[in-house]
Amino acid sequence: MLLDGKKVSQEILEEIKLAVDARKQAGKKVPHLAAVIVGNDGASKTYVESKIRACEKVGFISSHVKLDESISEQALLSEIEKLNNDASVDGFIIQLPLPKHINEQKIIEAVSPQKDVDGFHPINVGKLCLGMKTFVSATPFGIMQLLKRYKIETAGKNCVVIGRSNIVGSPMSILLSKNDYPGNCTVTLCHSKTQNLKDIVSKADIIVAALGKAEFLTADMVKQGAVVIDVGITRVSDNSAKGYTIKGDVKFDEVAPKCSYITPVPGGVGPMTIVSLMMNTLQAVEVSD
């Protein structure tokens, strides 16, 4: 069965819109999300535009700060400081990746934790580790929502996360092991140094593939009835009009028949990531009420 992120994200967007309408009627502040994009990376521009469209759907105010690729690190830090001090902005994101001459970690740490709706600031990551209420980074948050909405049983399940990035893999492993629903899994976090990867993955009840290698997970690595979450989005060159096809980390056509549930690419985790950002922005404005 498909875990349809497109469908679930639309349901959540409707819920957020109702909450925004209620805020308007009560004379409360309308949430304002800002996005900062540096340079002209095609994938980043597409992603930011989809976030702006989502803001329009739910009735958020959105603003878009476009900066030249050659901007200095200091000038970017000044732009972040302006957003930190702008009372009209409830949350903002810095679209990654940044140009090579800019220290990403330094930029992430410059964002006010109260406006860090991407959930990347060390303070918010620390709160996540301690099980405190915080902004959870959008992709893991979206995956948890998908598991919840489809009522996937997680307690006591053997879960394998492939990939240990700070944006997906690591927070995913924390969320799935916490004492909550979804959660209470026994989690194994695999990475490039993991030995016997195929053997470990083939025993998993739930697999989260987040390593960024197109069609890495094949049918011989997946047990019958497993739940598979595909986080990968890789542009693979082909002869189509666009010149590329989007592939996930899972070889969908051969893995899907073995799964009880699986996310498609596109239309699975991607839409959930965007809607989670909207949920975090709504949370930001509610905290400041």
Image: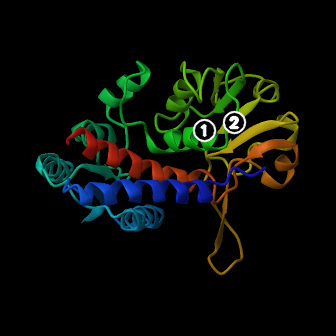
Residue 180, how many percent across, how many down?
55, 23
Q: What is the C-alpha distance between the residues marked 2 and 1?
A: 6 Å
Q: Which residue is mark 2?
A: 152
Q: Secondary structure at mark 1?
A: helix
Whether residue 288 is visible here, answered yes or no, is yes
- Can you give x and y, in whole percent of width and height, for residue 143 in the image? 57, 42
Q: Is residue 210 visible?
A: no
Give whichever of 183, 139 is nearer the camera. 183
How dense is the environment of label 2, judged by Cα within 10 Å: few (below 14), some, or many (20 and up)? some
* Badge 1 density bin: few <14, some 14–19, many ≥20, Cα 10 Å: some
Amino acid bearing label 1: Lys
Colour convention: rainbow
Closer to us: 86 or 164: 86
Tag 2: amino acid:
Ile
| Front residue of this view, candidates 239 and 132 | 132
Q: Which residue is mark 1?
A: 148
The vertical placement of 125 against 65, above or below, is: above
Res 265 quadrant in image:
bottom right
The residue positioned 41% from the left and 61% from the top of the image is 51
Provide the secondary structure element on which disc 2 rests. loop
Q: Residue at x 54, y 18 (%)?
A: 179
Q: Residue at x 14, y 47 (%)?
A: 81
Which image quadrant: the C terminus? Answer: top left
Q: Which mark is residue 33?
A: none
Q: Residue 76 in the image: x percent, y percent? A: 20, 52
Query: Disc 2, disc 1: CB below 8 Å?
Result: yes
Relative vertical location of residue 126 with respect to residue 52 in this rendering, above or below: above
